[in-house]
Amino acid sequence: MTATRPDPTHLDIGARLSRRAQTMNASAIREILKVTQQPDVISFAGGLPAPELFPIEDVRRAADAVLTRHGAAALQYSTTEGHPPLREWIAARHGIPARNVQIVTGSQQGLDLLGKVLIDEGDTVLVEAPTYLGALQSFQPYLPRYAQIPTDEGGIDVEALGAVLREQAEQGRPAKLLYAIPNFQNPTGRTLSLERRRALVELTAQYGVLVIEDDPYGELRFSGEPAPSLYELGLAHAGGDPDQNHVIYSSSFSKTLVPGLRDAWVQAASPVIAKLIQAKQGSDLHTPTFNQMLVTELLPILPRQIETVKQAYGARAGRMMARIEEHFPVGVDFTRPQGGMFLWVTLPGGLDTTALLPRAVEHKVAYVPGSPFYALGGGENTLRLSYSSATDAQIDTGMAALGNVLRGALA
Ligand code: PMP
């Protein structure tokens, strides 16, 4: 018998990757964006905040002030929990103690760390259909099992949620976690109604299911009335005790201020925060000290900045909806966002937006096909448009071109 030995001249390094690493996929959207990044194509595929609105002069002044005020401390290692004045400001705004706030390096890191501390292999994670692709990417390495909850114009279908929770509990394998984006969802732009928020918080509490409320867009409401966050409703449900709140809240300065500083936070009950701190120590020790001080220094201009961004996005969304009405054929449906950066288009069943994308690119316009946003598949006839960084002329030309493509597809 001859034992097979590794060939010392040719080590198959790919085969030595962890099972976890092998579950990771290149983001379908990144691949798609490559096709759409030709210079003469008007792309509504990206989801970038409008760069011309970044408060560059304020950041310059704040950087100088931070260095004058804090000197070397601004450039030194700091605590994992986060810069105390920033944590305290967030805590005060949400009426909770600072110990329930963890600063993270982008809410994307928050999602990864929450996956790490909450998801065991095989745990059921409930997600909206469709949901934020980046969250699926964060959770996937922790090997969850997904269940999709259908959504409609009012957000998550809470009756369907109730049925899934009941069924799973009856089967003796209750869901662990629900991940939801109640405000101006990425990718649909939809907002969960107040009634449904109440029902969702009640139902999940009843079944002992934790909720991750991802809310990077909540401050960017340009029409309609704000509703309380799931976190606030969860807090009320817990009699005001943040350590008994089954809702975990995640938000970010990326969409209100600037994304490149990577400053965001998580609000959660103390046992979750304690583990997030340990997980974050192993990940990056702490969010960059200088960036946290910079954001703290910029807090006084935040209300003005949010106003500027809201007005711009509201005008762009309004223009995009008007042009869609004008140019898209009958039978194509679209959401009417009241905030945020995205709008969702549904074509008649049977049409495939992935197959249609090359034709759109030929017509010099691009979008993201909807199906990658579904954890378990679906949505082949849907697509996402982002209006946040589009000019008026791009919206006018782009929606006319896309209207042509859709009319051709429906003919
Ligand atoms: N959650 C959602 C729903 C998002 O759309 C985004 C950004 N695209 C993020 C989280 C990540 O944001 P950040 O890491 O910049 O805070």
Image (cartoon, helix red, strand yellow):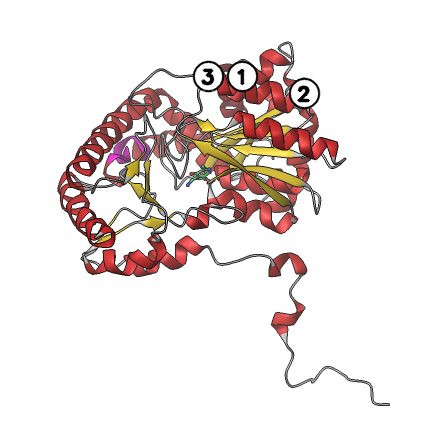
Residue positioned 67% across, 61% down in the render: 18
| Magenta-span inclusion, residue 231 | no
Of labels 1 and 2, earlier in sequence is 1
Image coordinates of residue 406 in percent, x first then y, are 23, 49
Mark identifier at residue 194: 3
- 77 lies left or right of 171: left
- The amino acid at mark 3 is Leu
SS label for mark 2: helix
Quarter of the image where ligand 1 sits:
top left
Residue designated by label 2: 206
Residue 3 occupies which quadrant of the picture?
A: bottom right
Image coordinates of residue 285 in percent, x first then y, are 60, 42
Give the dominant element type of the magenta stretch: helix, strand or loop: helix
Q: Nearer the viewer, residue 177 or 75?
A: 177
- The amino acid at mark 1 is Arg
Q: Is residue 173 visible?
A: yes
